[in-house]
Amino acid sequence: MAYDVVDATYVLDNLGKMPIIDVRPKFLYDESRIPGAVSVEMITAKQLGGDVAAEMARRAEAVGIGPDDECIVYCQDGALAHEACGYLEQAGYTALHCYEGSFTDWVTDPSRSLED
């Protein structure tokens, strides 16, 4: 595992400074998300079959995040974020930060803003 595991403080300190990838299903992203996050849905990438790592990289690049770009990855509870970081690493991404608590942790503090 080459990616870093980060917490909410790290995410807060980097809001607006680096891209944030939300790998949750699109309907959850559409409901509410960490400010500035972009959707790179992983479930549908897996459902396509084939090379999931390549598909995740394609989706990340489609929203402007390349293999050398530093970025934060999160999901609902952390499990998919770890999986997504693994796929992105397989595809050559080298500067990933996995928000382990993810959205479930983010919403525990009402002072943290949300975007919808």
Image: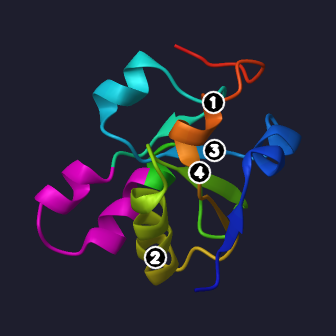
Q: CA distance from mark 2 to mark 3?
A: 16 Å
Location of residue 115 with respect to 51 vertically, above or below: above
In-image side of 64 versus 82 (left or right): right
In-image side of 27 versus 38 (left or right): left
Q: Callout 1: 10 Å neighbours few (<14), some, many (20+)? A: few
Residue shown at the point (46%, 76%) measured from the top left: 86
Q: CA distance from mark 2 to mark 4?
A: 17 Å
Q: CA distance from mark 2 to mark 1?
A: 26 Å
Q: Nearer the viewer, mark 1 or mark 3?
A: 1
Query: Residue 20 has which mark?
Result: 3
Which of the pair 12/101 is nearer the observer?
101
In-image side of 82 versus 4 (left or right): left
Residue 92 is inside the magenta segment = no
Location of residue 92 with respect to 88 vertically, above or below: below
- Element marked by disc 1: loop
Give the colour scheme of this rendering. rainbow
- Element marked by disc 3: strand
Residue closest to the far bottom: 1
What's under tag 2, amino acid-wise? Gly
Q: CA distance from mark 1 to mark 4?
A: 10 Å
The span shown in magenta is 42-59
User: Which comes before the other along the chain, label 2 or label 1?
Assistant: 2
User: Which comes before the other along the chain, label 1 or label 3?
Assistant: 3
Q: Callout 2: 10 Å neighbours few (<14), some, many (20+)? A: some
The percent position of residue 43, horizontal first and vertical second, equals 24, 51
Query: Residue 7 has which mark?
Result: none
